[in-house]
Image (cartoon, rainbow, N blue to C red):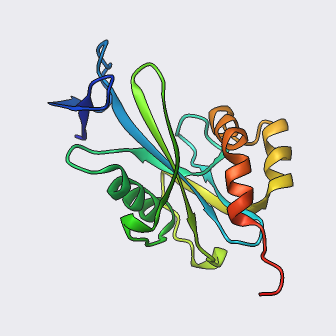
Amino acid sequence: MEFNDIYDENRNLTGKVHKRGTSWQPGEYGVVVCVWVYDGRGHLLLTQRAKGKSFAGTWENSGGAVKAGETSREAIARELFEETGIKADPEEFELLDTDRDRNIFYDHYCLKRRVRLKDIVLLPGETADVMWASFGKVHWMIRTGKICKIIGHQFLRQEKQLRLRNMPKFGR
C-alpha cells in the first residue's frame, strides 16, 4: 500500500496523506516527477512502458509519484533508479519547470548521464525496453503515436531548454 502527501493549491503540505489508487478530493494535490536523461550529444533516454500498464508499449521519460515523506528530488532519484538502474544524487537533477493540473503538481527535471544501453537495468512490470533517441526521432515518435501523448506535450514544451543543454560542444 502506497501513500502520497497531500498538498493544497499553493503546494503547502496539509499534514494528510492520500492512498494510491483512490480519488483525490477537490483542493487536494499530489506531486509527480519526471526526468529527461540526456547524454550531451543530442540524445534523450526513453523507456518503453511494460505490458499491463496504462499506455502499454508506448515510450516515455522516467518518472512517477512522490511518496509520503519524500521530497521531489528524492522521488526522482528513486524513480530513475527503479526504472533504469541509473544512480544519481537528488542534488544532481536540474529542475526544468513545474506545472499543475486538476490534482497534481508536476516537477520536470533533466539529468546529464552517458550510460550504455547494456548497463540499463529495466524494472519488470514497469519498463520493457530502453533507447537513446535524437530530437528528430522523438518528433517522429510523437507524430506516429509511439510516445505517450502527455509525454509528447511535455517534451514540446521543454524542448528548447533540453536542446540548449544537450547539444555537443565543439572543440571539446
Quarter of the view holding residue 19: top left
Q: Position of residue 108 (x, y in %)?
A: 52, 46
Q: Is residue 48 visible?
A: yes
Farthest residue, direction top? 26
| Residue at position x 45%, y 68% in the image | 92
172 w.r.t. 134: above or below: below
> Closest to the observer: 114 or 59?
114
Q: Quadrant of the C terminus?
A: bottom right
| Residue at position x 56%, y 72% in the image | 120
Left or right of 48 on screen, residue 79: left
Q: Is residue 58 visible?
A: no
76 w.r.t. 88: above or below: above
169 w.r.t. 46: above or below: below
| Residue at position x 86%, y 45% in the image | 140
| Residue at position x 63%, y 77% in the image | 114
Q: Position of residue 94 (x, y in %)?
A: 50, 59
Q: Quadrant of the N terminus?
A: top left
> Closest to the observer: 163 or 37?
163
Farthest residue, direction bottom? 172
Left or right of 25 on screen, residue 147: right
Q: Position of residue 153 (x, y in %)?
A: 68, 34
Farthest residue, direction left? 15
Q: Position of residue 123 (x, y in %)?
A: 47, 60
42 w.r.t. 10: above or below: below
Quarter of the view holding residue 12: top left
